[in-house]
Amino acid sequence: MADFAGAFASSHGPLLVREWDSVPQSEKLRLEKAFRELGRRVTAARPDVLVTVSPDHWANFSLDNYPAVCIGVGETNEGPPEPWMKAYPHRELRGHPGFAFHLLNESLQHGFEPSQSHRLKLDHGTCIPLWRMELSKMPALVPMLVNSIEPPMPSLARCLEWGKLLRKAIESFPGNLRVGILATGGLSHSIGEKTMGAIHEDFDRETIKLFASSEQSLVKYLEKELPSRGNGSEEVRNWLVAHGAAGSRGFELVDYLPVPAVIVGCGFASWR
Ligand SMILES: [Fe+2]
């Protein structure tokens, strides 16, 4: 049986890299500190494998075929294709086919039908948090790409169920392995729509608070609010996967700060 090593969540807004120089110094320091603290928590959890839960920002999929959920089962995946991510030090990232195929099989046996890929490009959504956390040792990565950018998307309740399935798959894996989860995206932001640049701090703070409440309260609030809180806010789905895997008992907030220079309400958290 594998062990659940913990779950972690981080925002991944592209401007955290592209516009880093224009972030005010005090916010830079807080962001650096938050990423490093999250990295410290990941390192302390000693994961052999990290299941990375993030959307695909058109690096692998297009409107010709955009899966609701895709699991990366390959030996390796590619680093970020974005030209502005070229300084990211990993062009290839090691996968873990053993756990990935187990997760895929468990999914299909229990009423979930993800697609599979033997080689994915891991875009900024996965790689910005991995980069900024400054991990001394990179675990094997099993990418789980959840459509949280192109409607219609998996329901919020289904994302919680995915988390529970993921936890069961970890606990039924026949091997000695520590498996953690890194969920990325959110909190509020708006990309390529009329409200682009808006950060809804009130929504972000209420969402953070409700993660300590019941699943029902959290889902009810998000279902009501997400349509008016910017399209990027939909990425909170990935946090729900982590939340479900960790038993829906609330997280330890590392930090939250709205950063207008990167147009994202930046949140960082971990679950045990
Ligand atoms: Fe994103």
Image: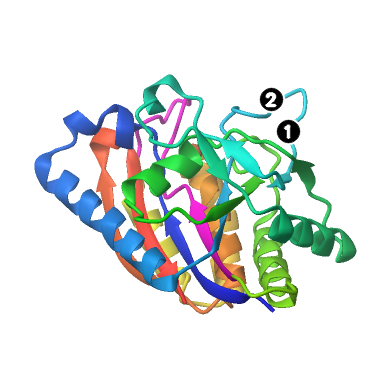
Q: Quadrant of residue 214?
A: bottom right
Considering every residue shown, the one lying at the far top of the view is: 83
Residue 113 at least partly seen: yes
Asked whether disc 1 touches disc 2, contact meaning CB atoms under 8 Å apart, the reply is yes
139 relative to 110, above or below: above
Q: Is residue 246 left or right of residue 167?
A: left
Camera-side residue of 195 and 121: 121
| Boundaries of the magenta span | 178-198
Main structural element of the magenta stretch: helix, strand or loop? loop
Circle 2 sits on which residue?
A: 62
Question: Which amino acid type is marked by label 1?
Answer: Tyr
132 relative to 255, above or below: above
Give x and y (percent) for residue 270.
Answer: 42, 68
Camera-side residue of 3 and 166: 3
Q: Quadrant of residue 244?
A: bottom right
Q: Quadrant of residue 116?
A: top right
Circle 1 sits on which residue?
A: 66
Residue displayed at 26% across by 53% down: 257
Give x and y (percent) for residue 229.
Answer: 46, 44
Question: Which amino acid type is marked by label 2?
Answer: Ser
Q: Is residue 227 left or right of residue 16?
A: right
Say which element carries label 1: loop
Camera-side residue of 154 and 200: 154
Residue 200 highlighted magenta (yes or no) = no
